[in-house]
Amino acid sequence: MADTPCGTGVDRLVMKLRARDLVSDEEEALLRSVFDESRSTAACKTLVRAGVTLSHCTLLIDGMVCRYRDLADGQRQIMELHVPGDFLDLHSFLLKRLEHNVGTLTPVTYVQVPHDSIRAITEQNPHLTRLLWFSTLLDAAIHREKILSVGRRTALSRIAHLLCELHVRLGLVGLANDNCYKLPLTQTDLADATGLTSVHVNRMLKRLRDAGIATYRGGEVVIHDWGQLQKVAEFDPAYLFLDRRPR
């Protein structure tokens, strides 16, 4: 695992925060100062293991990871997908360990910040503390939407909803344009994220493609009809709290 300077790697975190509130130059400088050197890890690796005591938090710089749990028979449920600019385990600052694993779906680059540095921020910078708190609350909102998808949405709606959500979240950090974005995941990954089988995922993607709504091929999503994709998904981005206001 080679270390390289994180440089502008924290930019996407700042972009996410500034989409929701003002972040001063001083707050940005403080954020940049607390992270260590960037590290890289291959796909299919565990970054954070359930039950292990943690002393730092991890921020994803590049690539894609997931929170997941495994059953005894080997089945995996992905509870959330994370994109660049996301903290993977900020809540470990208070919990000290996770009850689930965090694993890489693609090759990734990440940086870490010691819990002691997070504690110093909470004691000295109340506004930045609220923004970090907001990040954990946003994760919880995304989890609740995931429960709704897996519990009540149809298979087609689940796939469409996931494609809508990722389009918005990647767009916030400059990784999606008006109609396409990279999504280098397997159909098994998509199945585990939606509670479906790979065969079912394939069928739903074909339905979206045949209807001229969206195409997922070669690790890229192309949206042909954003309005129709939202309609199929019953997608309302309100749960992503995209409004910019004082926190």
Image (spheres, helix red, strand yellow):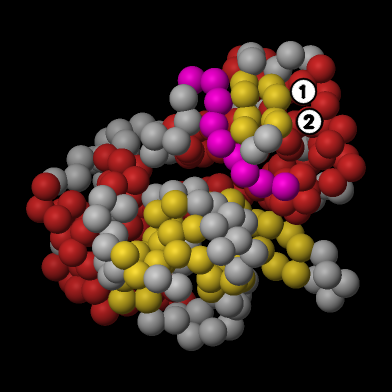
Magenta span of residues? 178-186
The residue drawn where x is 83% and y is 70% is 74
Gap in angstroms between the C-alphas marked 1 and 2? 5 Å
Q: Main secondary structure of the magenta part?
A: loop
In the picture, which quadrant includes the N terminus?
A: bottom left
Residue 25 is situated, as x and y percent measured from the top left of the image, at 11, 47
Q: What mark, if any, has residue 208 been given in the picture?
A: 1
Say if 121 sits above or below 162 in the image: below
Three-letter amino acid code at disc 1? Leu
Residue 223 is situated, as x and y percent measured from the top left of the image, at 62, 21
Residue 147 is situated, as x and y percent measured from the top left of the image, at 69, 50
- Mark 2 is surrounded, within 10 Å at the Cα level, by few (under 14), some (14 to 19) or many (20 or more) other residues, namely many
Q: Nearer the viewer, residue 141 or 63?
A: 63
Say if 91 sits above or below 146 in the image: below
Q: What mark, if any, has residue 205 been given in the picture?
A: 2
- Mark 1 is surrounded, within 10 Å at the Cα level, by few (under 14), some (14 to 19) or many (20 or more) other residues, namely many
At mark 2, the secondary structure is: helix
Residue 179 is a magenta residue: yes
The residue drawn where x is 82% and y is 64% is 75
Q: Is residue 208 left or right of residue 35?
A: right
Residue 98 is situated, as x and y percent measured from the top left of the image, at 54, 75
Q: Is residue 124 left or right of residue 57?
A: left
Three-letter amino acid code at disc 2? Leu
**Quarter of the view holding residue 31:** bottom left
The residue drawn where x is 56% and y is 64% is 42
Q: Is residue 27 visible?
A: yes
**Quarter of the view holding residue 145:** top right
Residue 167 is a magenta residue: no
The residue drawn where x is 48% and y is 38% is 169
Most extreme residue toward the bottom is: 53
Say if 16 sits above or below 37 in the image: above
In the rendered picture of this protein, how many numbered marks are placed on residues? 2
